[in-house]
Amino acid sequence: MSKGWKDSVARRPLLAAIGALVGIGVAGGALYEASGVLGIGRKSGAYEDLLAGLQDREDAAKVGQAVLTGDPHFHTGHAARALRVRIGKKTLSEVLAQDAVQGRIVETQGWVLPEAFTQLCALAAEAS
Amino acid sequence: MSVFSDARTVPAGSTIETDLVIIGGGPAGITLALALAEKPIRILMLESGGTSFDDKTQALYDGTETGVHYTPLNATRQRYLGGGTNHWGGWCRPLDKGDFEKRSWVPHSGWPFARTELDRYYPRAASLVEAGPFDFDSNSKPWIDQFGAPLKLGAGGVYTSWFQFSKMRGSELPTNFGERYADDLKRLPHLTTMLHANVTNIALAQDANSVDHLDVATLTGRKFAVKAKHVVLATGGIENVRLLLASNGVMKQGIGNGNDLVGRFFMDNPIPRQTAKLVVFNGNLAPYYTDNQNGGGAIFRATLAPTDAFKRTSHVMGSLTTVENKVDLDDFGNAAVAATASALGVDASNAQAYALGCGMELKPEPDRRLTLTGERDALGMPRLRLHMSIGDEDFALYRQTMKELGRQLLVARTGMIHLDRSARESWLETLDWGNHHVGTTRMHNDPKQGVVDADLKVHGIGNLFVAGSSTFPTCGASNPTMNLLAVTLRLADHLKRVFS
């Protein structure tokens, strides 16, 4: 029995474990997204990649709470997916300015705001 | 130098003959008299009041109001020489080019001539109100260097425009035509200014094609007649209606009212207060936004206005938004500003919020109207009732313009807008009016759509003209005085041709 075989055998459980973890992770992510699709509330760091662009997260969450209150059908999962696509490699400020240029603005408690910003704020409120 | 004539001394039952009678000694009447006085035309200007306020004369304005709250009819003007300039704010701005256009989204819109028709009269009109050089449309203001650049806005539908103000002398009010031009009126050889002279009837010839004479009365009970080749009615957007409708001896519906238009389409500029909040991220706002400033030979103030292009594409009405006082934001507002600015990558640690106010343009509405009542004044003239209205759409359209301003601030990353009012009740809470009386003898080349034609002649009456903002088919958002002077100067040119 070669050493390499032994090593190979020894690695199998490890790879299986890793594979299982990845599978659990993917399934978990899917389930997480599904929970969003189903409108199930949650609090986690799932939007950290998006929320990292917010310098003032506490205030954003206040705005986001108003967004969620004003729009009971707001869908965090959909919003997160759309934001990931929209932001891509752009900075948040670029995206918001683009929203304003293109007329994608919404009104939240009387404040005229870029649409993407209100979506981010809603995610911040969800995550807080 | 002569003195003013006094109608109370005219022999009762006499008839005065002249070339031209101007009924009303307000800004339109005085401007017309001054513009024509160098011509060999005998002019008689009849003014109801004297040279100062008098309770009994003022009471001739008494009337009633229905509909949304409006200034009592006896409080919107002071009835003595100077008319509408006896108490006014002096705000001057020409109408926009688009105000003259037929706008598909504005029923009954469209003047019979373009703004270019008035361009040659505006400088003189600005001179008469002593508003400084006429360069409202110029992009390079002489005061920018002194006071700083306008608020930076992204490309879009709202821009910084300018008011210039009628000259204010220290603590005095803006140019009062009765005082300012009294000496000129007295000096002109062909002009007689007669005070305390109330025209109570425009008597048509039996064929109803021309004015035969005017019946004049004083509050002291004296009555006499005036015969003239031509008559110009210049008593303001409310009293013009009363005299035309009450003069029903030959035309039972009233003069010029064969198509039931006299008194309809009353317009004013609503002035809702605290309509919105403007937040400037860096806290720096040039002082000409919040207060009148002196510069370049003018007293001026910035305003935020929709462009004609934006009006066309968004179907909004005219509006002129002014920045008022500094205000504090609530906790939510502070959070919204802080979070938005940081997300835009802007420092808002010195952000400042300001309350906004505005003057709006109403859509012409035939049921917003003046009608005669059964009540009579001291001269036996029927009194008026004004039915005033403002639609939810009027507020909604202005809100749309403010939203556009908010968008442009975000594009420029210079600030934000908060819309303070939404429900109708909220708008009405602080609603004031400009007391600009517009539209009641509207101008249109088609007699079925207008009381006067493009030369301001009453349709069907050969020698009767109307001057003043009552002839404006639409009111725009700009204050009417300087604009009605420009239209009156145009009328003066027409009358010069008529008399030549």
Image (tube, helix red, strand yellow):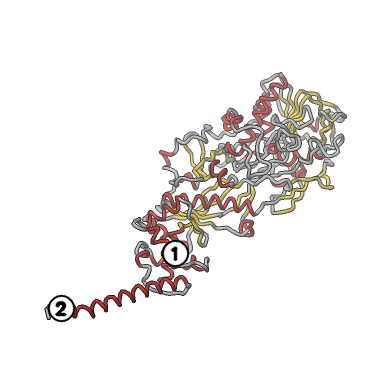
Residue at position x 60%, y 36% in the image: B175
Q: Chain of mark 2?
A: A
Return the x and y of residue A31 as percentages of the image width and height: 41, 74
Q: Nearer the viewer, residue B318 or B179?
A: B318
Residue position marked by numbered label 2 in the rendering: A5
Q: Mark 2 and 1 residues: CB-CB less than 8 Å, in contact?
A: no
Q: Chain of mark 1?
A: A
Residue at position x 82%, y 43% in the image: B382
Q: Is residue B428 left or right of residue B328?
A: right
Q: Can residue B5 be seen from the camera position used here? A: no
Q: Is residue B108 left or right of residue B214?
A: left
Residue at position x 85%, y 37% in the image: B248
- If the image is split into quadrants, where does the C terminus of chain A sit? bottom left
Residue position marked by numbered label 1 in the rendering: A79
Q: Secondary structure at mark 2?
A: helix
Q: Secondary structure at mark 1?
A: helix
Residue at position x 40%, y 52% in the image: B282
Real-space CA distance between mark 2 and mark 1, rounded to the nearest whole angstrom: 49 Å
